[in-house]
Amino acid sequence: MSLFLRHLLWTTVCPVSVTVLIPYFLLNEGLDIDIPMGWVQWSGLFLFGIDASILLSCIYVFARFGKGTLSPFDPARHLVIKGPYKYARNPMYVGVMIMLVGETLYFQSQTFLIYAGIVFMLFNAFIIFYEEPYLRKEFGEQYDRYRKHVRRWLPGNPYGHFVTMKNTKFTKEIL
């Protein structure tokens, strides 16, 4: 299957399920969807839109540089440390979480807030107990160096900022 179709499949299965399909079913559990548009709703839409673009950027970088998808069943073949990944190790998860915060604001729903909290806990557990050990095993020293300088959740200085020119081979790999 082509990389494009694999991305389409896993984008639908993973982030679209978490940010659109499950929230849709939560809405059908009695939440009134006829909501007047105030500044809170506009803020929620703004967050959702901005972070949807971050998510799409992450998916593009995974395809272009990682040669894989966002799925643990079809992972990147190369360590992705470009684009949004220069600033945070998990920008795709961050994007999904901020989209959920945007939905929470838009619908002003405690149910969505609880759902977002559960999703965050599940993401964090998955990253700590599966993804990071897998990346350490798969990419070794390269991942360890990246992990040492780039935060798990909050964006910081770009990764290339920390790499010295003494290690030119490694620098060329990431920049």
Image (cartoon, helix red, strand yellow):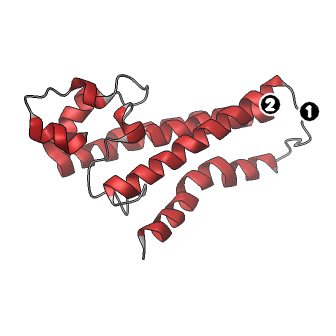
Q: Amino acid at mark 2?
A: Gln
- Observer able to see residue 49: yes
In this image, 12 relative to 69: left or right?
right
Secondary element under disc 1, as helix, strand or loop, is: loop
Measure the C-alpha gap from mark 2 to mark 1.
Answer: 8 Å
Picture quadrant of residue 109: top right
Residue 156: x and y in percent read 38, 23
Secondary element under disc 2, as helix, strand or loop, is: helix
Q: Pointer 2 and pointer 1: residues touching (CB < 8 Å)?
A: yes
Residue located farthest toward the left when viewing the structure as drawn = 166
The residue singled out by tag 1 in the image is 36
In this image, 93 relative to 68: left or right?
right
The residue singled out by tag 2 in the image is 41
In this image, 49 relative to 37: left or right?
left
Picture quadrant of residue 118: top right
Residue 129: x and y in percent read 33, 42
Instruction: Give the total number of marks visible in the rendering.
Output: 2
Q: Quadrant of the C terminus?
A: top left
